């Protein structure tokens, strides 16, 4: 049976890259950038004043001049003035303004005294040296340099760069339409009356919420009963209309698990079924004839949610062209014994150790149906198969629910 790493490799090798499209900057938050953002001019584009004060020649102050005549006041957004030829010349400037021509430093208000049109440097202030309180032109980036690389998920930081560099539209990955399918006759909607033998739908709600949080908001929920002709009809439409299909339940070996045979009949090629892990051993992955990835997650809530974060969300990031996030490592707070010859995807709570290391405290579930047990956890550690005893301090990869 496949290891988790082996299953991930098969998925990444098979899943097609989402196509690129242009997106208005106002709609770009959360999308994955697919073309480098370059500076259209030097950043900053001019010598920028960084403190309110007075612009002057540093050499004049170094030569003993302590009293300066204020020639004018220059605010941010004004064309720069030119400093007069006298060593005693200075110009009052505001933060964000262009450094006046002929000046090379700025003395802040706090280090000066003002009387009429004259400013005097106060004893004990900083030395007026060239470049003081000046953000030099091009010191951040030169025109044409890459500022944000393709593969970044766009947040306010990257969008600020795009705006400052004059990009009203950005090239991003297509936002995929995702179908989230809950299966089973025992399921009823949240607002419906529930009989003693029924359970409310939760997997599809949880998965849709996690998809939105991860940057994939175009997710729709569906319910398939264990009725073969209904499965055949609805599955055909979903496979034709959606870019990604996520199924929870119905892919094991039960008498009413019709999905595997129906997926095959509709041209979905199974890449693998079953991963040597707990929870989530029955996890299934395949591709339709039009290269639509189909993920079939186990029906148990903890298994479904864990497989979503271990395989599906990383696969969507990969298909979006997103730069892989560094995988965090955390140390067990205490010993763990896990005897099945399977990888253990162990829910944990994170804290910080005495040397600022990440410490993972196990939070074992009552069963893979104990969804409420995940509420107080931060994610899961992946403990490898082939080892029964994991001592306190054992370091393993950590994956967050966030």
Image (tube, rainbow, N blue to C red):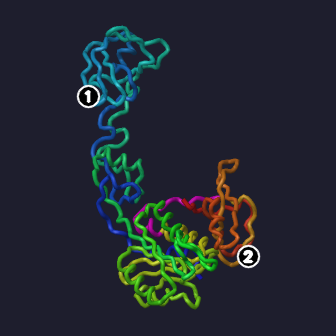
Task: Examine the structure image and report whether residue 381 is included in the region drawn in magenta.
Answer: no
**From the viewer's perspective, is residue 74 above or below residue 323?**
above
Residue 222 drawn at (x, y percent): 45, 75
Q: Residue furthest front?
A: 193
Residue 310 drawn at (x, y percent): 55, 69
Pointer 2: what residue? Answer: 339
Residue at left offset 52%, top offset 69%: 191
Q: Is residue 397 left or right of residue 113?
A: right
**From the viewer's perspective, is residue 238 above or below residue 358?**
below
**From the viewer's perspective, is residue 229 above or below residue 383?**
below
Dot 2 or dot 1, earlier in sequence: 1
Instruction: Magenta stretch: give its range.
Output: 315-330
Tell me the SS state at disc 2: loop
Residue 372 placement: quadrant = bottom right
Verify CB contact (< 8 Å) between mark 2 and mark 1.
Answer: no
Total number of numbered discs in the rendering = 2
Residue 402 placement: quadrant = bottom right
Residue 122 drawn at (x, y percent): 45, 12
Q: Disc 2 versus disc 1: distance between alpha carbons?
A: 72 Å
**From the viewer's perspective, is residue 24 above or below residue 244?**
above
Residue at left offset 25%, top offset 16%: 84
Q: Which mark is residue 333?
A: none
Q: Is residue 199 left or right of residue 172?
A: right
């Amino acid at each position: 049976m496949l290891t988790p790493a082996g299953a991930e490799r098969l998925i990444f090798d098979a899943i097609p890259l989402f196509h690129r499209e242009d997106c208005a900057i106002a709609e770009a938050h959360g999308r994955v950038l697919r073309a480098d953002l370059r500076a259209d001019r030097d950043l900053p584009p001019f010598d920028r004043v960084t403190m309110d004060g007075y612009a002057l020649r540093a050499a004049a102050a170094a030569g003993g001049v302590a009293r300066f005549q204020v020639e004018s006041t220059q605010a941010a957004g004004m064309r720069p003035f030119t400093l007069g030829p006298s060593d005693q010349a200075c110009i009052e400037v505001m933060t964000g303004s262009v450094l006046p021509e002929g000046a090379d430093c700025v003395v802040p208000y706090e280090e000066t005294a003002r009387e009429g049109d004259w400013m005097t440097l106060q004893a004990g202030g900083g030395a007026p040296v060239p470049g003081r309180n000046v953000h030099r032109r091009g010191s951040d980036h030169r025109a044409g340099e890459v500022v944000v690389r393709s593969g970044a998920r766009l947040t306010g930081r990257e969008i600020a760069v795009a705006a400052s560099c004059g990009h009203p539209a950005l090239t991003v990955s297509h936002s995929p339409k995702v179908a989230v399918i809950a299966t089973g006759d025992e399921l009823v909607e949240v607002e419906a009356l529930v009989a003693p033998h029924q359970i409310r739908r939760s997997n599809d709600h949880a998965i849709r919420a996690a998809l939105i949080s991860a940057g994939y908001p175009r997710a729709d929920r569906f319910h398939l009963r264990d009725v073969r002709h209904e499965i055949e009809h609805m599955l055909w439409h979903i496979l034709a209309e959606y870019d990604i299909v996520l199924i929870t339940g119905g892919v094991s070996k039960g008498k009413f698990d019709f999905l595997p045979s129906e997926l095959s009949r509709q041209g979905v090629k199974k890449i693998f079924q079953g991963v040597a892990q707990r929870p989530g051993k029955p996890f299934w992955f395949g591709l339709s004839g039009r290269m639509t990835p189909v993920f079939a997650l186990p029906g148990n809530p903890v298994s479904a949610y864990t497989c979503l974060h271990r395989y599906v969300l990383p696969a969507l990031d990969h298909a979006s062209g997103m730069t892989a996030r560094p995988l965090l490592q955390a140390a067990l707070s205490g010993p763990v014994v896990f005897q099945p010859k399977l990888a253990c995807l162990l829910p944990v709570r994170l804290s910080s150790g005495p040397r600022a290391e990440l410490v993972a405290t196990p939070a074992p579930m009552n069963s893979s149906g104990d969804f409420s047990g995940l509420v107080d956890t931060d994610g899961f550690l992946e403990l490898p198969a082939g080892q029964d005893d994991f001592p306190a301090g054992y370091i393993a990869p950590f994956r967050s629910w966030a």
